[in-house]
């Protein structure tokens, strides 16, 4: 397998780190070398969170150089724009269109719908899959499933072509608390209908 460079990004509380761990676990279960690095300190404050995930032979560092990411999996549109310089030409963006208003914007009374961020992504990236994450989590009935829905959409789009749905389901059973496994399995399967 060729190397895959994946950046996952969002804000604290969206499950960015868990999604990264699910991809990593699924890849390692297939015998693929994996390196990862993430920011987690801001997670509790609703700040920016991202993970660099590198998979495949010959990976020497977990950090992804600008312009070399194959996939940008973004749970929040402004965070997708912030990380866009890391995407390679021809790379794929899978983005949730539903924004989370930054505290600074809320305090200033700024209007932020996320639409301008999605438009920017569509203008500056060749392959952009936009999902209405809010509508999707309402369909599942739990806002905590956004990360798995987005991961499932990336999987269904072919951006994670080295994994199957069954690989990710096995990782969910391994990494998610038992009482949430069925819910996350449902979210992953539902995501394939969105692509």
Image (spheres, rainbow, N blue to C red):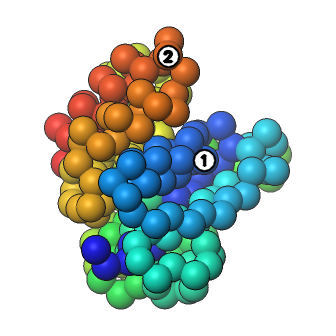
As drawn, 78 above or below 20: below
Q: Residues within 10 Å of mark 1 (few under 14, many from 20)?
A: many
Q: Is residue 165 left or right of residue 92?
A: left
Whether residue 130 is visible, yes or no, is no
Q: Which residue is depicted at the point 23% across and 62% down?
A: 161
The image shows residue 33 at horizontal and vertical percentages of: 46, 66
The image shows residue 3 at horizontal and vertical percentages of: 38, 77
Q: Nearer the viewer, mark 1 or mark 2?
A: 2
Q: Quadrant of the N terminus?
A: bottom left
Q: Which mark, residue 146?
A: none
Q: Which residue is depicted at the point 46% across and 82% down?
A: 58
Identify the residue at the far top of this view: 179
Q: Earlier in the sequence, mark 1 or mark 2?
A: 1
Q: Which residue is depicted at the point 24% across and 38% down?
A: 166
Q: Which residue is mark 2?
A: 178
Q: Residues within 10 Å of mark 2 (few under 14, many from 20)?
A: few
Q: Which residue is mark 1?
A: 17
Identify the residue at the far front of this view: 31
Q: Which residue is depicted at the point 46% across and 47% down?
A: 25
């Amino acid at each position: 397998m060729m190397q895959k460079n994946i950046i996952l990004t969002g804000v604290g509380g969206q499950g960015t780190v868990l999604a990264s761990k699910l991809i990593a676990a699924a890849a390692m279960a297939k015998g693929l070398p994996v390196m990862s690095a993430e920011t987690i300190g801001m997670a509790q404050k609703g700040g920016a969170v991202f993970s660099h995930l590198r998979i495949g032979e010959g990976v020497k560092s977990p950090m992804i150089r600008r312009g070399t990411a194959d996939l940008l999996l973004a749970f929040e549109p402004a965070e997708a724009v912030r990380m866009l310089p890391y995407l390679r030409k021809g790379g794929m963006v899978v983005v949730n269109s539903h924004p989370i208003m930054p505290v600074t914007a809320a305090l200033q009374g700024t209007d932020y719908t996320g639409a301008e961020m999605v438009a920017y992504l569509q203008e500056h990236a060749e392959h952009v899959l936009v999902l209405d994450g809010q509508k999707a989590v309402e369909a599942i009935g739990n806002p905590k499933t956004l990360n798995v829905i987005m991961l499932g959409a990336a999987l269904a789009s072919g951006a994670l072509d080295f994994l199957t749905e069954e690989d990710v389901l096995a990782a969910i059973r391994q990494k998610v608390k038992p009482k949430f496994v069925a819910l996350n399995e449902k979210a992953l399967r539902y995501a394939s209908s969105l692509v």
